[in-house]
Image: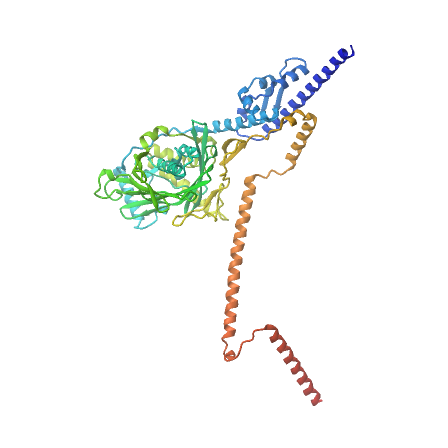
Amino acid sequence: MELDTALPIVKSKEKSERRRSSIFSLLKIQKKLTRQFSEPGHFAAKRNNRKYSVDSAILSDYGKANGGTKDYLLEGNGLSMSVTELAGAASDSDSDASRSGMPDGQKVMAITRKQEILARIDSSYIEDTNRETGAAGELVEEVAEENKSLLWFLLKQARPGMDLSKVVLPTFILEPRSFLDKLSDNYYHADILGQAKYIEDPYLRFKCVLRWYLSGLYRKPKGLKKPYNPVLGEVFRCFWMNRENDSRTYYVAEQVSHHPPVSAFYVSNRKDGYVIEGSLLARSKFYGTSTSAILEGCARVHLLQWDETYITTAPYAHCKGIVMGTLSMELGGKVHIMCVETGYQAEVEFKLRSFLGSADQTNAISGRIKKGKETIATVEGYWDGKIDIRDKRNGEESNLLDVAVLKEQRMARYLVRLDCQHEYESQRLWAKVSDAIQNNDQVAATEEKTVVEEAQRARARNLVATWVPRYFHKDFHLQPPEGLIEQGWRYNHVNISPWQPDEELEYEDSFVISTLRALESRSPVESRTRDPVRESRASDSDSRDEHARPKTTTRTLKKTLYSIESTLREHTNAIEKLSRAVESLSEGHRQAVAFRPQNVGRIPTTSHSWDLFGGFVLAIVLQALLNWLFYQKD
């Protein structure tokens, strides 16, 4: 009987404890959500409409404890949602988070943060509708009669062998986009690199990288056009969506130098196993009847899973027919793709069509894949058509790539909406020039182009210190293989570590590419024995600590370190110069002493202490002599 009467009391206590635990857990969730959404953001309106889920058992107990099925609101800065709304939302996300063994509050935070990032990306990026790729064959353009006088004006400014970077180009030969944008053409098929992480044979991985490299060349503008020269500090960003695995390849570029013009870029899709970084110096040369646009520098392709780096160079663009005939453009020169870790390398020659050559010579390439001095395979074909590869060891010939097929497999590119772009983003900076060119208004295009360039010159005149790029820095430790040129610029937030199991999402925010990691999960024992009161107090303490600590970002720390490193480097150089000057003075002094006439025939002293001792003795003798003379006189 006593047992029967005690049982309801025990059950009542357990029920009360369970309710208390649920209440504290819900309060903790509210506190964390309030802290999360109190941070400033660009898309607060999106947050108000988004639903979140918490454990249904907590909501059930909380509702019973408060006497009914009322809706209870969790409110914060830019956040207002009901408890019943929370209970019914995002069940699929709950199941994903529950597999990681996270506590309920951490589940909500992880899901919320990921959804917030994806919502921001979806609202700020828009798919690029320009799918023009150009046709295979020679790239030509007929110059209109009214534009021929502008070409002659250009020729009057130029001399054979001259660099054309300072020559003002007529707007009718300009492509309505920046050079930073044009560099991104190489990554429409970056998903080919994603296949490399599944390939165990180093030679097959090298072929995969070579195939990707050649896949980025076929896109051509309509007519013979040249992109804008980026101004100092100009930036550009975009990403490509891989529909097969729902991953994104992010691209960030910045004009880090204007004289000479150097463009730095960074491409990342760590989930698919690759990161690309590089910097190129663009210069043009005039040869009297033709010009060449030359890119000096290289790119580094990192295959993260295999810890391999592939170094690549770029061909030059050759334009002819300026003085007479039809304007035409081809790619020329030899490019290199090499991997130090595996020893494989390729040299591919882009052949220029000869004066009397047939159409078969247009856009032709040939190359060899080697390991050491041994030729493994040969490559033949057309960079805007089909390219075949022939294995020298077994004689097998196969197709490396077919541009006609590749065009159907292009990943969709996404650009930042114009109203979300910063002041110096390429599309926004050149928007008026591009609009005028697309409307065939050459006068307005020239005027707007002049406005942008004059603003750049005025900014350069007002600089009181050396320009410091926002997202890239000079790395003096980068050493290219012999014979190659390295401009040496690196992304401030470079990350070439392999993708980890706890990493949820790679994303870009204001040109900073970061990774979202899953919150650290608790063990089952910790989850069962946790004290909600202690956790609530700890949460309050953490909140106070966050407000008390200064908000020093990783970016600020890195910039400070780079500044300190540059200052130390300058001081080290100054000390070395001073040391060399002192050494040269000392050497000159020693030589002057050694070759004095009175020292000829004498044995030079070798001890400075003996010189001092002799001088001291001589002084005593002279003093004694003087004393004796004066004493005798008296």
Q: Given the current orientation, which residue lies at the most extreme front position?
A: 394
Q: Given the current orientation, which residue lies at the most extreme top position?
A: 1
Q: How many marks?
A: 0
Q: Look at the image and tell me in which quarter the N terminus lies.
A: top right
Residue 403 in the image, given as x and y percentages of width and height: 32, 32
Give the camera-side residue of 207 and 297: 207
Rendered view: 504 above or below 18: below
Q: Is residue 337 visible?
A: no
Say how the picture is coloured: rainbow
Q: Look at the image and tell me in which quarter the C terminus lies.
A: bottom right
Residue 109 in the image, given as x and y percentages of width and height: 58, 27
Rendered view: 24 above or below 516: above
Question: In the picture, residue 218 is in which quadrant?
Answer: top left
Give the camera-side residue of 7 and 55: 7
Residue 259 in the image, given as x and y percentages of width and height: 42, 48
Q: Given the current orientation, which residue lies at the most extreme right position?
A: 2
Rendered view: 390 above or below 3: below
Give the side of residue 485 with respect to residue 56, left or right.
Answer: left
Residue 480 in the image, given as x and y percentages of width and height: 42, 47
Q: Is residue 210 visible?
A: yes
Question: In the picture, residue 371 is in which quadrant?
Answer: top left
Question: In the picture, residue 542 is in which quadrant?
Answer: top right
Give the camera-side residue of 210 and 109: 210
